[in-house]
Image (tube, grey):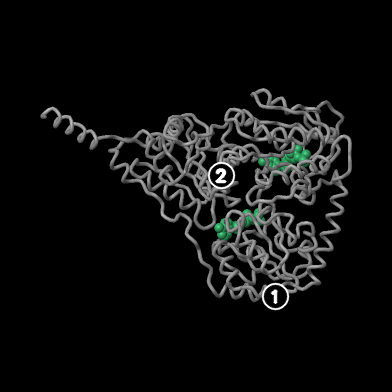
Amino acid sequence: MAEVDNELQRHAVEAQTAQTDGFHLVIDALKLNGIENIYGLPGIPVTDLARLAQANGMRVISFRHEQNAGNAAAIAGFLTQKPGVCLTVSAPGFLNGLTALANATTNCFPMILISGSSEREIVDLQQGDYEEMDQLAIARPHAKAAFRVLHAEDIGVGVARAIRAAVSGRPGGVYLDLPAKLLAQSMEAEKGRNSLIKVVDPAPRQLPAPDSIDRAVALLKSAKRPLILLGKGAAYARADADIRALVEKTGIPYLPMSMAKGLLPDTHPQSASAARSYVLAEADVVMLVGARLNWLLSHGKGKTWGKPKQFIQIDISPTEMDSNVAIEAPVVGDIGSCVKALLEKVGNGFPKPGAEWLNAVDERKDKNLAKMAETLSKETSPMNFHSALRVLKDVVKENPGISFVNEGANTLDYARAVIDMYEPRKRLDVGTWGVMGVGMGYAVAAAVETNKPVLALCGDSAFGFSGMEVETICRYDLPICIVIFNNNGVYKGVDVNPTGGKDPAVTMFVKGARYDKMMEAFGGVGHNVTTPAELDAAVKEALRSGRPTLVNAVIDPAAGTESGRLTNLNPQSSASK
Ligand code: ADP
Ligand code: TPW
């Protein structure tokens, strides 16, 4: 009996003195808050953090370059409304991830970049530590918020603050600095457990002021030629059914921004996508829902916008209002709450826009759609962008639940116009910065987060920025089909060196490159295709098998234009005028 008592006492003492450490506390804090996946790249001082995360049931996806891991985390945030987590080593690893953090902040995606860092005492005296860098200071201007934790007992607070900062209000990128010493610090397990915080209501609803709703509805009612413009903020907000109801109850034509495509199916009768230039120029009242009047919308002024406009803007960020032009009816709040309030006010008797406006929009649409159908139906040899896109348009129509990742210049601009989306948050692309290199990171995270196939369409240049991740795709055996529109260069593949010298022109790549072999090198499936029929068969086989696949689609090197549709943004040298 005494022996049993002794044993129990020993267990009790052990339980009291059981220890935990920084590594485990970080993992426990993330898991406590429902974060299941980490996208990262191991090394000093975070190798064991990644190992232990995997050992403790988190899914850890190890990349070949931190920028791609960061892009994966960012788009995971967009897809789930939970911050996507990227884990990197110090200094160079951190900097590699920082581009993605800045891109997440710019695009309003919630993300947390967690980087290990060197010892404060040495960094602050600039004594030359291994991978020494004042990471917190460098991250700050590129992030919505940046925090450093120095004591293990503060890890719970640090993670809680990072989560709140990432997802509340306007979402964005957050940097969390974890010095190597912190990870190894130990403390009593029970104290550690009690120090963790499960964040309650991390992204609280923000209700719009009732008078802002009255003002918006009055302006909408007064409109002769109203237009609703849906941005990726609306897609992120997951108010899909209410947004659709608002569009349908008001009968107003709508335009989706690129990543808002599919919020309502692009084939919806009220979609004005095929009459974009016309409606932007002609509308008299425009209601922006989670879309900013930045360069993608010509800042709300100039020729694009034609006739004088009045704007209603729904956005969670009050300072977004009037940032480019006057906003007559600002509605500040979360989109879910704002749209609900608008719906209540609109009721069932909202006067539909006049037939003159709706008929004019439909007329343009029909004309442009007929023109597009003709362009798409042309058989060309070699393939051009349109004959190849015709195939992918049908593939997405038949598989509306797959994610569609898209980057490039012409490859992006044409695909955006040609490929209809049918479900929300399925089109993932270069976003607010028009940044190349998001392709493989986005594709990996889309596959991991949705558990559904991904079709990633990249220009040959765009793909090159993250192409090494085909190994990651094969290693994790992800159902990703990459299609590369290979026209031998940036924009096109026909430029010549103006000096006549041996070096290729600056926009040229190796002619006839076989990107499909890259996928084969790691055990995936490669196809080289030169006709729409071959492209069709290769993509369908990939979707059927779910195997990592890369389709090198040979496109006419002369097809396409400089900078796709952004030719007007290129400064011209006097020599090339
Ligand atoms: P797009 O590029 O599609 O036009 P932007 O990224 O420019 O879209 O705009 C997205 C906007 O949506 C941002 O101004 C952001 O503040 C806003 N936003 C994001 N999430 C929400 C939300 N849940 N409720 C309200 N506004 C949101
Ligand atoms: C991080 C500049 C914009 S588009 C593009 C570049 C290099 C590639 C276009 O060629 P691609 O597509 O992909 O072959 P296509 O269809 O026209 O043939 N660095 C970054 N971001 C950007 N946007 C650039 C450079 C750029």
Choose between 59 and 233: the one closer to the eye. Answer: 59
Residue type for callout 1: Pro
| Rendered-image quarter of ligand 2 | top right
Q: Nearer the viewer, mark 1 or mark 2?
A: 1
Q: Which mark is residue 351?
A: 1
In the image: residue 237, left or right of residue 393? left
Instruction: Name the quadrant of the N terminus.
Output: top left
Q: Residue furthest left?
A: 2
Identify whether 311 is placed above or below 108.
below
Residue type for callout 2: Ala
Task: List x then y, in percent, for residue 568.
Answer: 79, 51
Element under disc 2: helix
**Residue 506 seen in the figure:** no
Residue placed at 43% from the left, 43% from the top?
Answer: 30
Q: Which mark is residue 281?
A: none
The crowd level at tag 2 (other Cα within 10 Å; few <14, some 14-19, many 20+) is many
Which image quarter: residue 469? top right
The crowd level at tag 1 (other Cα within 10 Å; few <14, some 14-19, many 20+) is some
Task: List x then y, in percent, for residue 420.
Answer: 74, 50
Mark 2 — residue? 76
In the image: residue 500, left or right of residue 544? right
Earlier residue among tags 1 and 2: 2
